[in-house]
Amino acid sequence: MSSTIIITLVVAGIVLLLSLGYLNNVLEKNTLNKARRKAELIDRQRRCATLSETLPGQLVNVELKQLLNRIELKLSDELIALDPKNAACKARADQLRELIGQGQALPVTNTPLAIASKAQIKDVRFQLESLQAQIVRAAEGKVISAVEGKKWLSQVRHMLVSVYIDYFNAIGNDFLAQKRANQARLVFERAVQFLNKQKNPAPYQQALLEFEALLAQAKSLSVEQTQPNAGQ
């Protein structure tokens, strides 16, 4: 065998090894990307389902439930395309199609939540931030239009303000009932400042007037409590 043939075979062998290594690297990369995408879809699917079931009842209506159903169905379809043998995902997709088919007749069974603690307000704020993220991703993925996404993001901001109004009302009035005027005054001052800082304060004018009246009541009670009585 001539040296030329030997060199040619060696070069061919090296090229073959490099090609196999490259192909193997591409396959591993594709497998990793597929696994990451699958994990992302499962996580987003779970978040949508959880939000639909656990958001406080006072924040949920049929339109919001159906929005979450539509987003989750799109995620389910993408997941089925990646994992066609996923029977659980197929069953969930069928269930979502049935729920979406009910339209405005879809029942809303979320329980209203009386928000009266920092822990509760923190949990609900976290839920609304998660909802906002799902809406943004849905608009980016063309699941909903940009106009619809903008409308829903505005609605989520309104939900958060409403939650804080309920929170300030609950703890402020509780302090008043306990004759803890100074604590009530601080709460109502925070409420007034919070509403005045809103970019669009118009929808909250009635709540602002009520908080201002409660603030005046708390201040008056505080003055009464700090005055020395006649016996002293």
Image: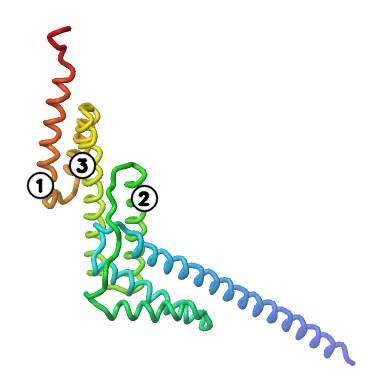
Few, some or many residues within 10 Å of mark 1 (<14, 14–19, 20+) = few
Q: Quadrant of the N terminus?
A: bottom right
Asked which quadrant contains residue 95, the reply is bottom left
* First-in-chain label (1 vs 3): 3
Q: Determine which residue is flagged by label 2.
A: 123
Q: Is residue 200 left or right of residue 63?
A: left
Q: Name, please, the residue furthest toward the top.
A: 232
Which of the pair 95/32 is nearer the observer? 95
Q: Could you say where residue 54 lies in the image, as x and y percent from the top left?
A: 35, 60
Q: CA distance from mark 2 to mark 1?
A: 26 Å
* First-in-chain label (3 vs 2): 2
Taking 50 as reference, is 230 above or below it?
above
Q: Could you say where residue 159 lies in the image, as x and y percent from the top left?
A: 24, 55
Residue located at (20% from left, 39% from top):
191
* First-in-chain label (2 vs 1): 2
Residue located at (76% from left, 86% from top):
12
Which of the pair 18/125 is nearer the observer? 125
Query: How is colour applied across the structure in the image?
Result: rainbow
Q: Determine which residue is flagged by label 3.
A: 169
Q: Name, please, the residue furthest toward the bottom.
A: 1
Which of the pair 197/210 is nearer the observer? 210
Taking 161 as reference, is 218 above or below it?
above
Which of the pair 84/143 is nearer the observer? 84
Residue type indicated by callout 1: Gln
Element marked by disc 2: helix
Residue type indicated by callout 2: Asp
Q: Determine which residue is flagged by label 1.
A: 206
Q: Is the residue under label 1 in contact with that under label 2 (CB below 8 Å)? A: no
Q: Name, please, the residue furthest toward the front.
A: 231
Residue located at (47% from left, 80% from top):
80
Few, some or many residues within 10 Å of mark 3 (<14, 14–19, 20+) = many
Residue located at (69% from left, 77% from top):
21
